[in-house]
Amino acid sequence: MRKNIVAGNWKMNKTHAEATALANDVVGSNYAHEVQLIMFPPAVYVSEISKIAASSNVAVGIQNSSQHESGAYTGELSTSMIKSVGANYVLVGHSERREYFNEQNDVCAAKVDQILKAELTPIYCCGEVLEEREASNHFNLVQSQIEEGVFHLSADDILKCVIAYEPVWAIGTGVTASSDQAQEMHKFIRTLLVDKYGIDVANDISILYGGSCKPSNAKELFANADVDGGLIGGASLNASDFIAIANSF
Ligand code: 13P
């Protein structure tokens, strides 16, 4: 059965002192342990924060990884390095990576392969910008992101992945997708998975919602049949908000 997951993407925020304090607060919090919590700090803190989280049920991930195995790629981090410092999850294809770093579906697919090769869990992000939704192209767009990013995987490998739907117009804007809009797209993604891999596989894959998710709207979003948790930006920068979201199932 698929897991409920609440993941905090801290993006490019927090000094070292602030980041370690936040990690300690999250790890020391009370939350329902059937929810998998994951912290995604900036890469430079991942090693230390993995140690902070080591004796807890909270997992740690990294916001980006290289599609290459090793070598002359200045500034990049390989999945084997990431694994060796204790991270277990990697974000792939976040809309900010797609927009500002020109990451296309083929690069995301290569990243997914490296992540799985290192026995880490990719959280593969998809989602449309506002113009695409207004042009009613959002289903097509998300379909191509999913097909080109992860549909080369075997059933065994797709089962090791998590998918996150993050409508770009809802990220950091305060505008959340309505509960119905979220469920509609999550159901669409689940149906793509059913058509490609069958119902049993599709039902075992967690699909997270991201985009202005906060304590006040998490319960309604998570109540949907195909919404298995959240990928949280702004509200994950505060431990009590993040934990309130985790306790919203
Ligand atoms: P916000 O929760 O700040 O809208 O960010 C969502 C996000 O991009 C998480 O990856």
Image (tube, rainbow, N blue to C red):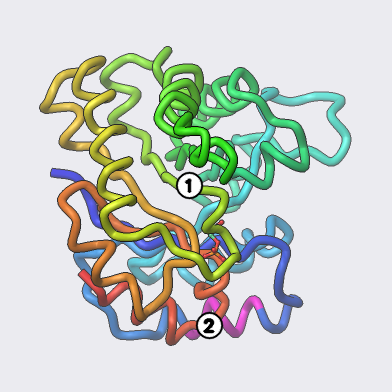
Q: Horizontally, is 19 left or right of 70 in the view?
A: left
Q: Horizontally, is 188 left or right of 151 in the view?
A: left
Residue 207, quarter of picture? top left
Measured along the vertical axis of the image, is residue 217 above or below residue 97?
Answer: below
Measured along the vertical axis of the image, is residue 98 above or below residue 216?
Answer: above
Image quarter hosting the N terminus:
top left
Residue 140, quarter of picture? top left
Residue 214, quarter of picture? bottom left
The structure residue drawn at horizontal position 71% and vertical position 75%, both measured from the top left corner, is: 14
The structure residue drawn at horizontal position 39% and vertical position 70%, both measured from the top left corner, is: 55
**What distance separates the C-alpha of mark 2 from that of mark 1?**
21 Å
Image quarter hosting the C terminus:
bottom left
Please state the horizontal and vertical placement of residue 158, each as a whole percent of the image.
33, 26
The structure residue drawn at horizontal position 86% and vertical position 25%, both measured from the top left corner, is: 72
Please state the horizontal and vertical placement of residue 145, each as a whole percent of the image.
49, 26
Mark 1 nearby-residue class (10 Å; few <14, some 14–19, many ≥20)? many
Secondary structure of the residue carrying tag 2 is loop
User: Mark 1 highlights which residue?
Assistant: 89
Dominant secondary structure, magenta: helix
Secondary structure of the residue carrying tag 1 is strand
User: Does residue 37 show up magenta in the picture?
Assistant: no
User: Mark 2 highlights which residue?
Assistant: 238
Residue span colored magenta: 19-25
